[in-house]
Amino acid sequence: MKYNFFKLLLINLILGGFANTLYAQQSALVGKVVDKASGETLIGLSVGIEGSQKGAATDLNGSYVIANLTPGKYSVTFRYLGYQTLTVDDIVIKPGAPTNLNVSMEEAKQQALQEVVVKASFRSASVGALYAQQKNNISISSGIAADVIKQSPDKNTSEVMKRISGASVQDNKFIVVRGLSDRYNTAMLNNSVLPNTEVDRKAFSFDIIPSHLIDAITVNKTASADLPGDFSGGAVQVNTKDFPEAKMLNLSIGTSFNSQSTFKDFLAPMSVNKTLLGSYNSNRDLPANFPSKAAYLALPAQSNQRFAISKSLANNWGYQQRTAGLGPNFQANFGNSKIFENNHKLGTVLSLSYRYDERLKDVDQIAYAGQNVGDRFNDQIYSYNTNIGGLANFAYAFGNNKLSFKNIYNRVLESKFTNRNGIDESNETFNRTADYLLQRTLVSTQIGGEHLIAERHKSTADWTLSYANSNRKEPGFKRMEYSQGVASVPSGSSDPRLAGNFSSALSENVYGAGTNLTFPTQFFGKSNKLKFGYLGQYKQRDFNARVIGFIRDQQFNNASALSLSQNLIFAPENIRPGGFVLDEITNGSDAYDANALSNAAYAMFDGFVAEKLRIGAGARVEHYQQRLTSADNAYAPIKVDTSYLNLLPSINAIYNLTDKSSLRASASRTLGRPEFREIAPFAFYDFNKNVSVQGNPKLQQSSTYNFDIGFANYPATGEVFAVSAFFKSFDSPIEQALQLGTSGRTLGYTNAKSATLFGIEAEVRKSLKFIDEKLSNFMFSANGSFIHSEVLVSKLVNKNGYRPLQGQSPYLINAGLQYLQSGKNGFGLSLLYNRIGKRIWAVGNVQDADIYEHPRNVLDLQLSKKIAKSKAELKINYSDILNNKGIFYQDANQNGRYDAKLDHINIAERYGSSVSVSLSYSIR
């Protein structure tokens, strides 16, 4: 571990030295120009330095760069046909660093004989541009930018999303928007739809994207025709950087401590050290020449071949004791924008990240079946987690064109060893262990272009070609049980719970292509636009699993072996006639192939139909075909072939009350499509949650009608007050539910008949200088959502005849207080709070009540201090200070309130609080 720690540090330092010698910093003026009324970027606008010949024109993103400026004070003039000329004074250009100036331009009120010139200061111009961008997104949305992310203790994207208004995170990975579970959301990276990372759900695991790679996150809560139609909660857009504002190299090194884990005694698989670099010992995999199920079972029961094949599996059932250590983490980020003499621009962003930690989760569980109590046990779950990420973005702008090549790679390895001690329903004590490993990789690459196709009319076109691969492996998932010191090895047929060995592999490829055409138009006498586009996507998934396990041979005569420890019981000398041998119970449903083809086209109008009224109206047509091939347990073929054609209209309206406030309204129709896993008959046992998860080939598409109205005010720079109300009507919503009449507890997927949801959300971000000028460095932020949903159910299931949607929380609360000292070597403080209301984790039935996830309070603190003339920064993060339990329970008396004494607590989890320390250094 120490060797790898210093090896990675050395790589970072070499990268830093190389980049610093390759590039030197320049003095420059950079920024973006937008329309004050619409927030749209202005293309081809002239930017000039007063009293000189130096200048530039804005590109397709409204951005400009004037390089090689001598440090000093300047006045800059912005000119654009049909707009009032703007001159900004007192712009200070600093040596060796770029100065950023974003401005907003106002249309000329009338054609004047002489040029109308508006004067502004540097600060007022920047503030005006910020207002324009904040209040003019056509969709009702919430977001968070890179500078805010830096002030939080968040290490990955999923943690960042907890800070967004109306959003929460489930299982520390999956986003919930407006109380709707992750399956109602769509994930996009740089405007391309991301593949699912999970086998068992429609979800993207946002914890695999480190937070420092993010330029901005936007959660669109209302639909517009240019967004994919497959969401009812939110369309999450994660954008990474292409043209850095400044050349930089940032190196960071740190470590973390967990109160429940670090320096404590741990149990681990024998090959746990492999996890440090995101890999695992290959002897967990089945041997390359391991026969198929049919070939193996065709061999005579006591043949030498069966025993030889059984011995070919590595004896890796044992485990070791060790002491949990500190978790190291590293980051290296490099960015540069190179300006050439012909005003061409090359942008480069490179990033490497590494994070490793060892955590103990302490869990108490009771397996209820109706009112009856089944197994009762305590789990000690020892986790060893590695996250390795890389990003390489390149962009080249020339004339009125921009080309980009964006790539992201991430590998996550989770190794979990669970030690379970408890009492079964017969009051017999047992010890069970589970050795589980999951390796996930994501590769995403995108090639895109933006072009000005008509200079005079400023018509633009953009296109994207994308490819993504999500790969998931679960090799050698082994479970073992001892009762009264004797191993429970079955006879006759293997059991995955008893000496079972499960392996699975999933690979999903996603190919995408899209284009958008934008044409300015003079409809209604304003500079508005028509937009047309196409998006095509093809998904292809292969999944297969093998379920094998050791059994006692037909002539078993080695009872003493059953008292051996796990590392010895399946040693080669015990795999013999009269000893142990492998058996396989893989079913036809343990493999499936699936593909889906979607084609979508849209048309929309976006512009002002009156002086203060902006309308975005359009329609999207989506055709979706989904195919899946599998088999049932008897290997009879199962085929799913569905096709949907949908018209998805949407309208968004903004009425600008003032320059700083607006009213909004929206109406749309969106979809919820079944995912491959939700229709696949494959069943997987989740050892840690003590449930099996199985798909439903008869699952149907859901439809949602969405209505929103809201008000937003932006009183000062970075400040906001916004409130909105929303209503949703669902037809055939998809939910995860407990299955009745199954052996053990099984979760499946089902269509409810209908559901409704309505709610209100509010967001405030306010500087405390209104109390006293001395508090001007303090910023208070808070957002909250209050939501009510109803699904009609039988009164045999719920005495009220209705219940909330599965995964929907009745409220969400985020609050924070930030302090940032101005000047060099400043001090910073962030105190952040998050809480979600109780939500249904699994829908019940006539026997089993709904299982709820109880609210928990999460309080995080970050302290930061800049040193070395602000080139270095020390951060101390104290996460989950309150360390509330995670509780999953059934409301036994159905009174709607949690009662620890009366309600059925299925799961109670303890996570521990964490303290992390990091030191970063920036070379500019």
Image (tube, rainbow, N blue to C red):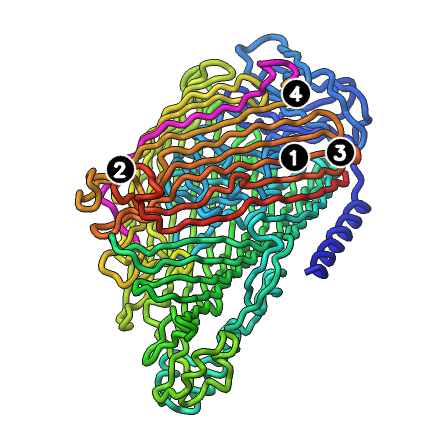
Q: Write down the residue under mark 2.
A: 895
Measured Cα–Cα span from mark 2 to mark 3: 56 Å
Of the numbered discs 2 and 3, the one sitting upstream in the chain is 3
Of the numbered discs 4 and 1, the one sitting upstream in the chain is 4
Q: Write down the residue under mark 1.
A: 863
The residue type indicated by label 1 comes to Leu
Decide: few, some or many residues near mark 1? Use Cα within 10 Å; few <14, some 14-19, many ≥20: many
Residue 47 image-quadrant placement: top right
Position of residue 95 relative to residue 421, above or below, is above
**Which x, y percent locates residue 789?**
29, 35
Q: Nearer the viewer, residue 257 or 292?
A: 257
* Quarter of the C terminus within the rendering: top right
Q: Write down the residue under mark 4.
A: 78
Q: Write down the residue under mark 3.
A: 870
Magenta segment's dominant SS is strand
Residue range highlighted in magenta: 749-774
**Which x, y percent locates residue 488?**
38, 74
The residue type indicated by label 2 comes to Asn
Measured Cα–Cα span from mark 4 to mark 2: 65 Å
Q: Nearer the viewer, residue 371 or 394?
A: 371
Decide: few, some or many residues near mark 4? Use Cα within 10 Å; few <14, some 14-19, many ≥20: many
Of the numbered discs 4 and 2, the one sitting upstream in the chain is 4
The residue type indicated by label 4 comes to Phe
Left or right: 524, with 243 as reference point? left
